[in-house]
Every structure is written in C-alpha cells, then in structure tokens.
Amino acid sequence: MNPAFVNFIYIIASILFILGIKMLGKAETARRGNIVSSVGMLIAVVITLFDKKIIDCSDPTSWGLLAGGLAVGAIIGAVVAKKVKMTAMPEMVALLNGFGGLASLLVAAAEYYFDSVKGQMPSDFSKFAIIATIFIGGVTFTGSVYAWGKLSGKISGKAKVYPGQKTVNAVVAMLTIAASAVFVVLGDFQSGLGTMIAVIILSLLLGIVAVMPIGGGDMPVVISLLNSLSGMAASAAGFVLHNNVLIVAGCLVGASGLILTVIMCKSMNRTLSNVLFSGFGATGSKSQKLDGEMKPMSTDDAYFVLEAAQNVVFIPGYGMAVAQAQHAVKELAEILENNGAEVSFAIHPVAGRMPGHMNVLLAEADVPYEQLKEMEEANRILETADVAIVIGANDVVNPAAAEDKGSPIYGMPIIEAYKAKTVFALKRGKGAGFSGLENGLFFRPNTRMIYGDAKATINDLVAKFKDK
C-alpha cells in the first residue's frame, strides 16, 4: 500500500488514541473514551494487516480470516468483560498488562530469529530496540502475573522480604543489563541468540523478584507502573517493526501510566523508590498503641441517626467491592436525599486495588458524577457532615497518617472521616486492613462499628426507611 496513505491512517488512529485517553480523565466521558480508543486500535490493526500483506484484498479467504479473527477476539473480550466481577477487575488489569508485555517480547524475539534465518544482521539500533523490548516485556509479564497472584489471593498479599534481598535483586538487574549490552555488541547470530535467551530468562526472573517485596496495599501503584511498562515495551516493539502507530500508542500508554504512578505516589506521600524497595507491610507497624475499644452499633440505632442527618458522606473502599454493595449504596443515597439530606461520595485516589476502582464501581451503579468528590473537596465537606459512612475502607481514612509519626503511612493524605460528627464503619470483623495496620478511627469516641456484610447492612437500612 502507499506509505503516505498508511501513515495518514496511522495519524488518524493516533489522534483517536489521544482523544480516548483525554476522555478517560473524566468519569462522565470515560466510557466514550474507551470506545474511541478501541476504534482507533481497530483501524490501526486492519490497515497494518493490509499494508504488510497479511491480508490479500483479492483473496476471499483472507477477508474471512480477518473477519473471523476480529469476531473471535471481540467475543472473548465481551465475555471476559461481562463475566469478570468488579472485585476481580484489578487482577484482570494486571493480567492484561502482563500479556501486553509478553506479546511485545515474543514479537521482538521472533523478529531477531527471522532475521537470523534470512542471514540479515540487524543494525546496532535495531538490536538495542529488540533487547529493550525483551527486557521490558519480560519484567512486565512476570511482574504482572505475580501482582495478579497477590490481588487474587492465589499467594499472600503481604510483602515478602528476606535477608540480602536487595542485593539479590540488584545482582539480577545488573546481570540482565549486562547481558543486554553484550547482545547489542555481538556480531554473530549464534552468540546473539544465546544471549537473547539469557536476557529473556533474567528479565522474567527480575519481574518476580521486583514485585515480591511490595505489599498488597501498594498494588494500585504497582499496577499503574506495570501498565506504563507494557506501553514502553509496545513502543520499543514499534521501533523493531518500524511501525509508527505502535510507537505512538506505546508512548501514550507509557507516559500516561507513569504520570498516574507519580500522582498515586503523591497521594500516599511516598516516593516510587519507597513503594518499590521498602517492603512496606512485611512487618508490623511501630505506631502508637491504640487505646479504647471499638463500639458496635445496630442497624436500628444507625437508622435513627441517619433519619435525622442533613449531610451524609459515603466513603467507599475495597470492602464495598467485595460485598458488591454499590447498587445498595446508590439506593440508600437516593432515600437519604428524598429525606432531605445532602449526599456525597468521598473518593481517595488509592482506594481499592487499582486506580479509579471506586469510580468504576459507583459509575456501574449510576451514581451521579456530581456527587463524587475528590479528596480535598470531600475533606471540606466532612468538617460539617452529620454522618460519614465508611464502607470497607481502612488505610485511606486512618488518622495515624496525620497524627502518628511512627506509622508507616505518616504524612499520607487521607479522607478525614474522623472530622464528621458521627462515623459509621461497616466491616466484616475487627481485622486490620490490607496493609496490616490497625486503624485508630475505629477507636474514636464518635465512631460506631456496624459489623457484617456491607451489602446486607445497607439493604437492612434501606428496608427500615421504606417501612417507616
């Protein structure tokens, strides 16, 4: 095909990618952004198939293969998206990141192998692009699979640390970099293939040992970083294949993922190096001893408090996702509004197990976008709130972040639920959060614990309002 025409189509696809990512920045346009980006990718894939003569315009069989491939992929994607539970969304995203990295690795390795078959030695730049793709893709794949294991409960979500771990990780990283450098300077295919295999093995190992010391509480940051790495791997693969749209798409994913990673680190008042290398959550906190006791409350008493409330703030966390309580919460919020209360939802940037987890849950329940309040605005509202309802959130409402200098989360910006006149904390039991830290909020004199399944508790409150 005419190269100018192909590049023109690639530009259109790239514009759609940029518009799609821009739309993802706002809850009300996020769904449209997904569709726009998907259309851009469809255009890029189809034009590439024709340009590389994988699909022959004059051959009906080729058209059948194209339609069949698109149909199979669309069906698999639709079924997975429909069946996956919202609680499983973070691990699904981790797997998608991982397979993106694996795909880039396989493309780069295959390109070098086919060059060797043809007897065409790649240039030094091409070899650099190939080994960079393999390096980043390998780390992304195993790192994402390990993150998936932690998020899905297949392995412990706690940080796994051992003596000399940082030294071991540094040695594996240096060996991978050294092998990559050797691959670039080697002049024959046979040695290059052996070195490439060594880099593949080392990069796969590096992905595991890099994620191993990271605790479950830091998984939102890790997922965002791995997403960025999958984009970087795709961009590097674009240089290997001399494909402009792959370079652009990969750069967009890599840059946006890195920006999101930085934002999330700031939301926890921690550096990226601290997240990656501190082993947070591996041992108990040195924070102050919590005095007092958790005071339980029945839903009967909670109903009377809510009936008189004029300003109610819901603070969702991973517990809401586990209980699938978002629709019940939406119904209770509507009842409270009809009862004359002002209702809002306080959203912490790292609540849940992935970036935007709570936004996705509440959007699924059709909670009005204007009721979703970011942390700073939510904290201003909480100063005058009659009731704050904490649904399965822990670290993002822990007062230790502001008051306990010995706490690992000290300095982390939080949703200041403790400022509300009354706090209802909905929890299944008295256990600590995913990070393993006790929450002083639950011991406050203005906090009442409502134990049990969050969805059942909310439904019980809804029933009491309907029966009055």
Image (cartoon, rainbow, N blue to C red):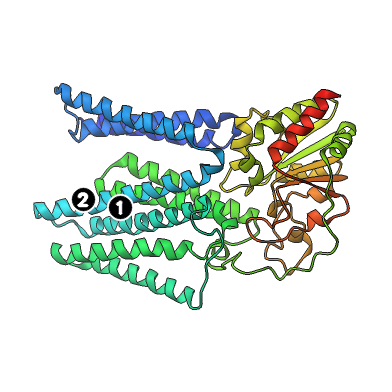
> Considering only vertical position in the picture, is 114 above or below 464?
below
Q: Secondary structure at mark 2?
A: helix
In the displayed structure image, the side of residue 311 where residue 159 appears, left or right: left
The quarter holding residue 56 reads top left
- The quarter of the picture where the N terminus appears is top left
Q: Position of residue 272 (x, y in %)?
A: 55, 61
Query: Is label 2 in contact with label 1 (beta carbons under 8 Å)?
Result: no
Identify which residue, 211 or 15, lies in the foreground: 211
Q: Which mark is residue 105?
A: 1
Q: Disc 2 versus disc 1: distance between alpha carbons?
A: 10 Å
Amino acid type for the residue under numbered disc 1? Leu
Which residue corresponds to mark 2? Answer: 111
Q: Is residue 376 visible?
A: yes
Percent from the top left, x then y, of residue 82?
Answer: 48, 31
Q: Residue at x 56, y 62 (%)?
A: 158
Mark 2 neighbour density, 10 Å: few (under 14) some (14–19) many (20 or more): some
Q: Residue at x 30, y 49 (%)?
A: 237
Residue neighbourhood size for the residue with mark 1, other residues' Cα within 10 Å, grouped as few (<14), some (14–19), many (≥20): many
- Label 1 residue SS: helix
Return the residue nearer the eye: 423 or 4: 423
Q: Position of residue 316 (x, y in %)?
A: 69, 42
Mark 2 or 1: the one toward you: 1
Left or right of residue 392: residue 8? left
Quarter holding the C terminus? top right
| Above or below 445: residue 339 | above
Identify which amino acid the numbered label 2 is placed on: Glu
What residue is shown at x 21% (from left), y 33% (from top)? 51
Closer to the chain start, of discs 2 and 1, is 1
